[in-house]
């Protein structure tokens, strides 16, 4: 089911949660609504579900205006962050619940319900837990049961609010890949809310970035990362060096072959877009190695770039482990910096690297 949101706005008192949001989600996509806490992403998810009403605007599901329709009339499955399983019901009964409360004319037979529940349990790879209670399950198992329960009513759209937020890092990692594979098999239009950029980039086919109730950018993970629409997206998605463009910066930037456009305030450079080489003498591009951290396959290098006024600007670079070993660098060494790629933006001067 395709989803079109037209001019959606929502206020809570004096707080503007959403400001004139326009968004189109094609059928079958797995979309992440990404942004910091309080940016409006969960409010938008609840408006799509019918759990909140917008102050203005329209929600179109498969071309039909559902703005003021009840959640029961939208064909939507909703998975909450904290599972919302019925603690007094077994896993089987939790999944069967949505089918059993359907109107009599639409209600499956007990045999159909039993077959459907076991098919869903097999889908989420937990059929052996059918007679357990939620308190007897791990967090990851509870989340998969909550997803199976949402799928039991055969929704046209699946909505997930911070689905892995309450789980530890190793379980989250496993469930991300599991959800992506599950979506590939089901092909149900799915939207999940997250503030975790890594989660969004790893799982979603489309990422929608929000900030302060505004939609900042929509695109594939690679589009969002490689071509940020503005300074906020560049800072929020991945690590970024933010270099203020004062006159004493331009020599070393031009030494990298960068063309500086007229009147930008700052340069954004990903750490992996900075090349290092041992310096033979001091120059515009020379920095001093302050520290480094081992990140598995990558080495993150902290560099101090001297400024004419005696202060230092900290710049971070990343490189493969073998490249770092090849350079044989030590703390205090002088290195020359070359920037392969950068983005130019207008924003406040003096922000620290993200």
Image: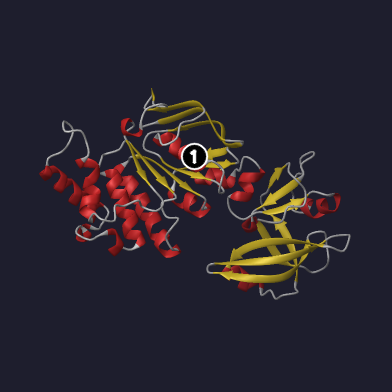
Q: Residues within 10 Å of mark 1 (few under 14, many from 20)?
A: many
Residue 220 visible in the shown view: no
Q: Quadrant of the N terminus?
A: top left
Describe residue 196's horizontal placement relative to residue 72 as left or right.
right
Describe residue 52's horizontal placement relative to residue 70 as left or right.
right
Q: Residue at x 22, y 36 (%)?
A: 102
Percent coordinates x, y for residue 31 in the rendering: 44, 42
Q: Residue at x 83, y 66 (%)?
A: 282
Q: Residue at x 71, y 42 (%)?
A: 345
16 and 262: which is toward the camera: 16
Percent coordinates x, y for residue 147 in the rendering: 32, 49
155 and 246: which is toward the camera: 155
Residue 252 visible in the shown view: yes
Describe residue 16's horizontal placement relative to residue 51 as left or right.
right
Secondary structure beneath disc 1? Answer: helix
Describe residue 334's horizontal placement relative to residue 37 as left or right.
right
Q: Which residue is mark 1?
A: 43
């Amino acid at each position: 089911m395709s989803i079109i949101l037209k001019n959606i706005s929502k206020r809570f008192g004096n707080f503007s949660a959403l400001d004139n949001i326009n968004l189109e989600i094609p059928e079958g996509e797995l979309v992440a609504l990404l942004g910091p806490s309080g940016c409006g992403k969960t409010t938008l998810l609840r408006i799509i579900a019918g759990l909140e009403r917008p102050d203005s605007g329209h929600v179109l599901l498969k071309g039909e205006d559902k703005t003021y329709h009840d959640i029961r009339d939208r064909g939507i499955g909703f998975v909450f962050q904290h599972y919302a399983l019925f603690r007094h019901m077994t896993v089987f009964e939790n999944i069967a619940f949505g089918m059993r409360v359907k109107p009599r004319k639409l209600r499956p037979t007990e045999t159909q319900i039993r077959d459907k529940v076991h098919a869903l349990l097999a889908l989420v790879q937990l059929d052996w837990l059918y007679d357990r209670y939620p308190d007897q399950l791990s967090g990851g198992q509870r989340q998969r049961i909550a997803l199976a329960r949402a799928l039991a009513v055969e929704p046209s759209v699946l909505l997930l609010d911070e689905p892995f937020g309450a789980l530890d890092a190793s379980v989250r990692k496993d469930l991300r890949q599991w959800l992506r594979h599950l979506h590939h098999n089901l092909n149900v239009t799915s939207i999940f809310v997250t503030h975790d950029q890594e989660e969004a980039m790893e799982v979603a086919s489309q990422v929608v970035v929000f900030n302060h109730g505004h939609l900042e950018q929509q695109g594939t993970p690679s589009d969002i990362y490689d071509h940020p629409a503005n300074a906020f997206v560049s800072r929020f998605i991945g690590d970024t060096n933010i270099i203020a463009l004062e006159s004493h910066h331009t020599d070393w930037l031009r030494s990298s072959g960068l063309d500086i456009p007229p009147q930008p305030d700052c340069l954004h450079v990903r750490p992996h877009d900075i090349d290092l080489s041992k310096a033979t003498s001091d120059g515009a591009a020379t920095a001093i190695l302050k520290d480094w951290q081992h990140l598995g396959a990558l080495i993150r290098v902290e560099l101090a770039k001297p400024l004419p006024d005696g202060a230092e600007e900290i710049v971070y670079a990343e490189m493969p482990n073998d490249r770092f070993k090849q350079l044989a660098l030590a703390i205090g060494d002088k290195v020359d910096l070359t920037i392969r790629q950068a983005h130019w933006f207008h924003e406040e001067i003096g922000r620290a690297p993200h």
